[in-house]
Image (spheres, rainbow, N blue to C red):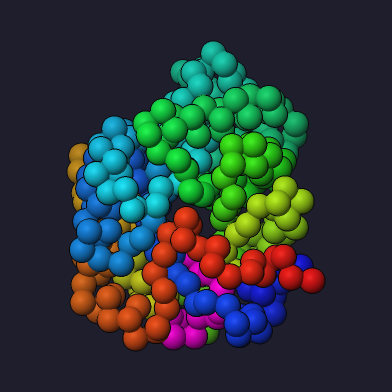
């Protein structure tokens, strides 16, 4: 049985006997040193309770130091198969890289996956190598999600679920958002709604592997930035019983980020808001319990109900 938000039914239909828990998860931990510092601040002074670490990121070592100094920060893998260079080594995953040994990019990877031109063994090798890099750094991944939601691509999703199960990672993101009250206000917002529908198709696959996903998801409803945070915060009082994951992208701006990404100043805006009294008050007023994925299974999983 699908979690309520993923099945398309009303979130309020979740059993009233369950806790109302919220994970505020910061994506792109380790992308750059500045992004990692921003996430640390949003955890130390704000409402962030969990982070997803980019194993091949320019700020990976900085993120490791931050995580080791904060043992109560839940850290999972932010699987990256589209940017930078593979952790396993380009020579060990030739169908995943271009002539320079860098990942192919989202569009090219998707086309190759759908046409059967990517080796599943190489996918397993690279996903496993990224998990192992976190473990060698002393971290036990609490969850897995994908950079630009790469893990949701058909064909790849089953491989991700298989490797996650073998590694003992119980939680995998399927970002089916709470329905927006308004029409999409941008192309990015429309894509987010499309992504939510696509994610619903993958939940049954998770169940086959005995994996779990949050009952509901907040984030990227309007394409990111402060507008997205305000929209998500307005939803907190109506969160259902069960677990909701709220995806955020705080970070400090550094030269590496300016080179890598077009989502730059918005990260600093997010960081400031997540550390603000307004954010803390929104969580407190909603009466939800702020947890990470290690503290989440305090209620019967919705997917276990029948």
* Residue 270 visible in the current orientation: yes
> Residue at horizontal 52%, vertical 27%?
129
Q: Is residue 240 magenta?
A: yes
> Residue at horizontal 65%, vertical 42%?
165
Give the magenta-colored segment's residue range: 234-248
> Residue at horizontal 50%, vertical 34%?
131
Residue 191, image quadrant: bottom right
Depth check: give the residue in front, 158 or 139: 139
Residue 220 lies left or right of residue 225; in this view the side is right
Residue extending farthest top: 91
Depth check: give the residue in front, 267 or 175: 175
* Residue 187 visible in the current orientation: no
Residue 151, image quadrant: top right
Residue extending farthest right: 306
Residue 50 in the image: x percent, y percent? 39, 56
Residue 221 in the image: x percent, y percent? 48, 70
Residue 158 in the image: x percent, y percent? 71, 43
Residue 285 lies left or right of residue 239; in this view the side is left
Residue 204 lies left or right of residue 157; in this view the side is right
Residue 74 in the image: x percent, y percent? 40, 52
Give the answer, above or below, for where 103 lies relative to 219. above
Give the answer, above or below, for where 239 lies relative to 119. below
Count of numbered tags: 0
Q: Is residue 256 magenta?
A: no
Specify the quadrant that holds the N terminus.
bottom right
> Residue at horizontal 45%, vertical 81%?
235
Give the answer, above or below, for where 209 lies relative to 275. above
Residue 21 lies left or right of residue 306; in this view the side is left
Residue 230, image quadrant: bottom left
Specify the quadrant that holds the C terminus.
bottom right
């Amino acid at each position: 049985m699908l979690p309520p938000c993923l099945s398309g039914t009303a979130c309020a239909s979740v059993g009233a006997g369950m806790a109302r828990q919220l994970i505020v998860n910061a994506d792109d931990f380790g992308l750059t040193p500045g992004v990692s510092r921003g996430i640390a601040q949003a955890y130390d002074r704000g409402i962030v309770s969990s982070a997803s670490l980019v194993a091949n990121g320019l700020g990976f070592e900085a993120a490791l130091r931050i995580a080791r100094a904060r043992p109560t920060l839940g850290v999972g893998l932010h699987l990256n198969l589209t940017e930078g260079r593979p952790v396993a080594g380009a020579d060990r995953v030739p169908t995943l890289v271009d002539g320079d040994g860098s990942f192919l990019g989202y569009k090219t990877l998707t086309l190759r996956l759908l046409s059967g031109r990517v080796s599943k063994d190489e996918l397993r090798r690279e996903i496993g190598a990224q998990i192992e890099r976190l473990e060698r750094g002393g971290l036990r991944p609490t969850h897995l999600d994908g950079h630009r939601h790469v893990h949701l691509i058909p064909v790849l999703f089953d491989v991700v679920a298989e490797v996650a199960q073998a590694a003992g990672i119980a939680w995998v993101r399927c970002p089916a958002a709470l329905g927006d009250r308004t029409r999409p206000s941008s192309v990015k917002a429309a894509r987010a709604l499309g992504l939510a529908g696509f994610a619903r198709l993958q939940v049954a696959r998770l169940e086959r592997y005995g994996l779990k996903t949050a009952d509901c998801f907040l984030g990227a409803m309007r394409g990111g930035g402060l507008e997205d945070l305000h929209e998500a915060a307005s939803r907190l009082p109506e969160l259902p019983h069960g677990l909701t994951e709220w995806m955020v992208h705080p970070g400090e701006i550094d030269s590496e980020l300016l080179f890598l990404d077009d989502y730059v100043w918005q990260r600093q805006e997010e960081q400031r808001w997540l550390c603000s009294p307004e954010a803390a008050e929104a969580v407190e007023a909603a009466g939800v319990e702020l947890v990470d994925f290690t503290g989440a299974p305090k209620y019967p999983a919705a997917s276990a109900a029948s």
